[in-house]
Image (tube, helix red, strand yellow):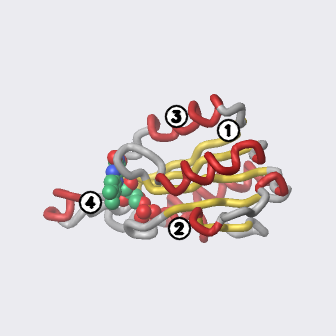
Amino acid sequence: MKTAIIYHSFHHENTEKLVQSFLDGIDIIPAKKVGDINLAEYDLVGFASGIYGGRFAAEIDEVIKQHSPELKRVFLVYTSHSDNPKYGEKMKAMLQELDIKVVGIFSCRGYNTFGPFKLVGGTNKDRPDENDLREYREFMEGLVK
Ligand SMILES: Cc1cc2nc3c(=O)[nH]c(=O)nc-3n(C[C@H](O)[C@H](O)[C@H](O)COP(=O)(O)O)c2cc1C
């Protein structure tokens, strides 16, 4: 199954750490470098992002906007301060409105020093951790096998 993960991760590279921890023939592509790659060549496309202001990165929205007719089956991966399931549900609903099938969602907490949290040394220090990476691997194995 030809799989790509398109990601945006800038705060502490938390999301990048996750997606780089399980490669297994997957094309890992920064959202800003997707350009005119034809995503229809992939059986499965993952969108991975930190959560910024309650949403996936605008860079991910832009790829979806430009490439939605090419997307068949999609999965979502995100890291955030609160690990609120609503972030994934909101993105899933948006994709479903475009007739894109969402076949899985993985999320975990990520180290966060945004805004006032910086003053207390941040939240979720050392996340994603070994346990998160193991759960992510299990999620990915379930998807691609
Ligand atoms: C500008 C900004 C806004 C954020 N907004 C939220 C938010 O609305 N909800 C939340 O749970 N975490 C929020 N966070 C925390 C990040 O989602 C979290 O640290 C994430 O793991 C960052 O991923 P990254 O290192 O891959 O960029 C925010 C972080 C930043 C920098």
How far separated are the C-alphas under marks 4 and 3?
A: 23 Å
Q: Which residue is mark 2?
A: 16
How far separated are the C-alphas under marks 2 and 1?
A: 21 Å
Whole-percent x and y of residue 142?
Answer: 73, 49
- Within 10 Å of the Cα at label 1, are there few (<14), some (14-19), or many (20+) other Cα atoms? some
Say above or below: 20 vs 110. Answer: below
The circle drawn on residue 89 is: 3
First in sequence: mark 4 vs mark 3: 3
Q: Which residue is mark 4?
A: 114
- Within 10 Å of the Cα at label 3, are there few (<14), some (14-19), or many (20+) other Cα atoms? few
First in sequence: mark 3 vs mark 1: 3
First in sequence: mark 1 vs mark 4: 1
First in sequence: mark 2 vs mark 3: 2
- Within 10 Å of the Cα at label 4, are there few (<14), some (14-19), or many (20+) other Cα atoms? few
First in sequence: mark 4 vs mark 2: 2
User: What kind of residue is marked 3?
Assistant: Glu
Q: Quadrant of the N terminus?
A: bottom right
Q: Is residue 4 visible?
A: yes
User: What kind of residue is marked 1?
Assistant: Val
How far separated are the C-alphas under marks 2 and 3?
A: 21 Å
Whole-percent x and y of residue 103?
Answer: 70, 39
User: What kind of residue is marked 4?
Assistant: Phe
Task: Give the SS element for disc 1.
Answer: strand
How far separated are the C-alphas under marks 1 and 4?
A: 29 Å
- The quadrant of the picture showing ligand 1 is bottom left
Whole-percent x and y of residue 130?
Answer: 50, 66
Task: Give the SS element for disc 4.
Answer: loop
The circle drawn on residue 102 is: 1
